[in-house]
Each structure stands twice: as C-alpha cells, then as structure tokens.
Image (spheres, rainbow, N blue to C red):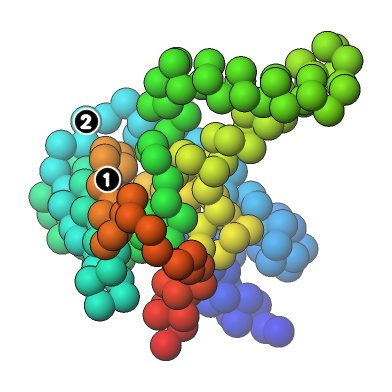
Amino acid sequence: MSTAELVKQLRERTGAGMLDCKKALEANNGDIEKAIEDLRKKGLAQVAKKAGRIAAEGVVDAYIHGNGRIGVLVEVNIETDFAAKNEEFRSFVKDIAMQVAASRPEYVDRDDVPAAVLDKEREIIRAQSLKEGKPDNVVEKMLAGRIEKYYKDVCLLEQPWIKDPSMTIRQLLNERIAKIGENINIRRFVRFERGEGLARREENFADEVNKQINK
C-alpha cells in the first residue's frame, strides 16, 4: 500500500489531519495500528486540556426503534452552537441514542451510581461469593473485579460501542472531542420501552439495533 493510501486510511479511521497522519506513519515505519495508537494518545492529551471548558450548547435528540417499541431521548452538550450543527457531532449524538436503546445503561458514568446502589451490589456479590465457599481474602478480590464488571454493564461510558466493540463509549467520546476540537459532555438520557415492567417475551434488542445499523 502506498504512503498516500496509508494516510487516507489513517485519516478515515481516526479523523486526524493529513499532516498528523503522515507524521504518525513516519514515526512508526508505516505501521498503521501503531500510528493509530500514537494519534489516540495525542488526542487524549488534547481532550484533557478541553475537559474543563464549559459545554452549554448542544442538542436533545431522539431515537425510536422497532416501530415505536423503544424510545430514547439524549442530551449531549458541546461548547458552541456552530459545533452543535456539525454533522460529525450530530452523528455522534445519534450513535449515543442508539447505544442507550441497545445496551440499556442506567447511568452516564460510574460517578453517577448512588452509593446506596453500590453498597447493595457489594452486599449481593459478597453473599454470593461466600455461599460458593470462597475465603474472605478471595471474596474481597473478587468483589473488586465484579464491581468493575457492574460498572461496564450499567454505565454508558464504560460500555463497548455497539458499532465497534473494541472501543468503549468513553474512547469514542474522546475521539470525537479530539476530532471536533471542542469539549463534549453526555449530560443525560432516558430510555422508554413499550410494556416495560409487564410480562412479555425476552428479545435481544442489541441484535435488533445492529440489524437496523447494517441495513
């Protein structure tokens, strides 16, 4: 593959500028995966600088799935009204709404999980582990690992992205911040499911959403 083709591919996968892509490839002897890693590291450094900036603009968007069976509203904020109209930003917001529909997160980030909920979860995990006959020191180690798994299940930013499970939503967010150049904040969401709480047959909504994505 020629240098130009590598640069084009790297730009498509990372959203970085042409010169940055060329430098990253040169620094990594044409290895595109290593170049991606370098660009992501640089992007994360840029993200850290932007994290403290106020993001008060943005959009509230909706996603309706399965002929009205699932509905999601999300609010995602960005720094300027101009950037809120950016197609890249709008696409990101839609991806977040689809993620909420498919993966059923309960919170945006782990800091949003109430202490009482965590205490209850720890109590359940500890009781299960002790029932399995595990010694106390092993139970405590298992507890930490299972709480991490719990975060990945219920926190949006910890979840694997349904379009690319090799990335978490946090990584996706950071890449969009680096690409657009403004701080972005997923502020809140609400998910409605028709008949929720009523007796109904189980279905795999993640598979359904993925089918719709790949149409």
Q: Quadrant of residue 15?
A: bottom left
Residue plotted at (56% across, 41% down): 152
| Residue lying furthest front | 199
Residue plotted at (47% across, 29% down): 110
Q: Position of residue 181 (x, y in %)?
A: 33, 48
The N terminus - image quarter: bottom right
Amino acid type at mark 2:
Ile
Relative to 116, say whether 46 is above or below.
below
Q: Quadrant of residue 182?
A: top left
Relative to 188, say whether 199 is above or below.
below
Residue matched to label 1: 189
Front one among 63 and 14? 63
Front one among 17 and 197? 197
| Residue lying furthest bottom | 215
Q: Is residue 176 left or right of residue 79?
A: right
Amino acid type at mark 1:
Phe
Residue matched to label 2: 54
| Residue lying furthest left | 81
Q: Is residue 61 left or right of residue 136?
A: left
Front one among 43 and 123? 123
